[in-house]
């Protein structure tokens, strides 16, 4: 999955960014969270828009101006500049925004950043399920992949009626099952197989390269 996940997540991200390029995000929420890495605390910087969609994720070992500046440059380059950028009282944000010339867009409030605080919860659930992380590279890869897949299937169930939610869910699933790499000479293909094991197998999936790509969720259940 380390090879497949970034491929699918990259396709999702590029499609969403290209479709929403003309839409101006009027408010961003930026925050950093602690993540344990082999007993050491590192920082995961995350930016979400006013609808809770994760825009950017970036892992660093420090929480200083240089880390904040690198993270904000990545987000601004990919998504453009927002009208308002809400942060907590960490001074690294102010220093980075002064260098970028966007200090007048910063807002700091006691509960103003609850949007991004709540967006940490799905990541925390997956983090516990995966029994933490051991490498910076794997943490960065997972954070990026998880954010894009969560954006694709997070349809705000509590804000829509049942019929609308089902239609959006079906559309998201149909888009997910489309060929992810039609223009690439070599594609990753899901191939279901049966393998003899000492214990009854649950789900077995083998990855092969080349050919056309069937549905992404294909797997054999025995």
Image (cartoon, helix red, strand yellow):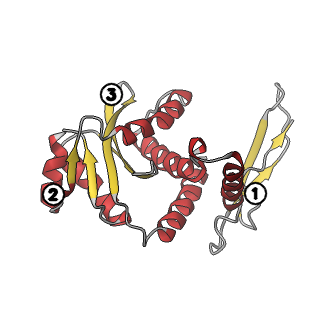
For image coordinates 75% across by 67% down, the residue present is: 212
Name the N-terminal-most of marks 1 and 3.
3
* Distance CA(mark 1)–CA(mark 2): 47 Å
Residue 40, numbered circle: 3
Residue 103 found in image quarter? bottom left
Kindly state the secondary structure of the residue where label 3 is placed: strand
For image coordinates 46% across by 49% down, the residue present is: 144
Residue 170 found in image quarter? bottom right
In the displayed orientation, state which residue is furthest to the front.
161
The picture places residue 219, in percent across and down from the top left corner, at 79, 46
Looking at the rendered structure, the number of numbered marks drawn on it comes to: 3
The picture places residue 207, in percent across and down from the top left corner, at 71, 52
Relative to 200, say whether 211 is above or below. below
Kindly state the secondary structure of the residue where label 2 is placed: helix
Tag 3 near tag 2, CB within 8 Å: no
The residue wearing badge 1 is 215
Q: Residues within 10 Å of mark 2 (few under 14, many from 20)?
A: few
Q: Residues within 10 Å of mark 1 (few under 14, many from 20)?
A: some
Kindly state the secondary structure of the residue where label 1 is placed: loop
Q: Nearer the viewer, mark 1 or mark 3?
A: 1
Residue 208 found in image quarter? bottom right
For image coordinates 54% across by 54% down, the residue present is: 6
Name the N-terminal-most of marks 1 and 2.
2
The picture places residue 164, in percent across and down from the top left corner, at 67, 53
* Distance CA(mark 3)–CA(mark 2): 35 Å
Residue 81, numbered circle: none
Q: Residues within 10 Å of mark 3 (few under 14, many from 20)?
A: few
The residue wearing badge 2 is 104
Dividing the image into 4 quarters, which one contains the C terminus?
Answer: top right
Q: Nearer the viewer, mark 1 or mark 2?
A: 2
Judged left or right of residue 68, residue 195 is: right
């Amino acid at each position: 999955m380390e090879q497949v996940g970034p491929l699918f997540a990259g396709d999702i991200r590029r499609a969403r960014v290209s479709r929403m390029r003309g839409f101006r995000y009027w408010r961003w929420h930026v925050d950093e969270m602690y993540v344990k890495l082999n007993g050491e605390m590192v920082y995961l910087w995350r930016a979400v828009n006013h609808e809770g969609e994760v825009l950017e994720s970036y892992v660093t070992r420090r929480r200083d101006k240089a880390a904040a500046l690198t993270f904000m440059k990545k987000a601004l380059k990919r998504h453009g500049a927002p009208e308002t950028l809400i942060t907590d009282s960490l001074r690294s944000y102010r220093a980075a925004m002064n260098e970028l010339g966007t200090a007048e867009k910063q807002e700091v409030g006691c509960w103003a950043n609850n949007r991004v605080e709540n967006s940490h919860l799905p990541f925390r659930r997956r983090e516990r399920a995966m029994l933490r992380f051991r490498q910076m590279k794997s943490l960065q890869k997972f954070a990026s992949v998880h954010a894009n897949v969560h954006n694709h299937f997070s349809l705000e169930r509590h804000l829509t009626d049942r019929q609308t939610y089902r239609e959006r869910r079906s559309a998201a699933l149909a888009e997910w099952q489309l060929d992810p790499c039609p223009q690439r000479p070599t594609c990753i293909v899901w191939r279901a197989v049966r393998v003899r094991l000492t214990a009854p197998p649950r789900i077995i999936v083998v990855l092969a390269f080349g050919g056309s790509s069937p549905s992404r969720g294909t797997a054999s259940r025995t």
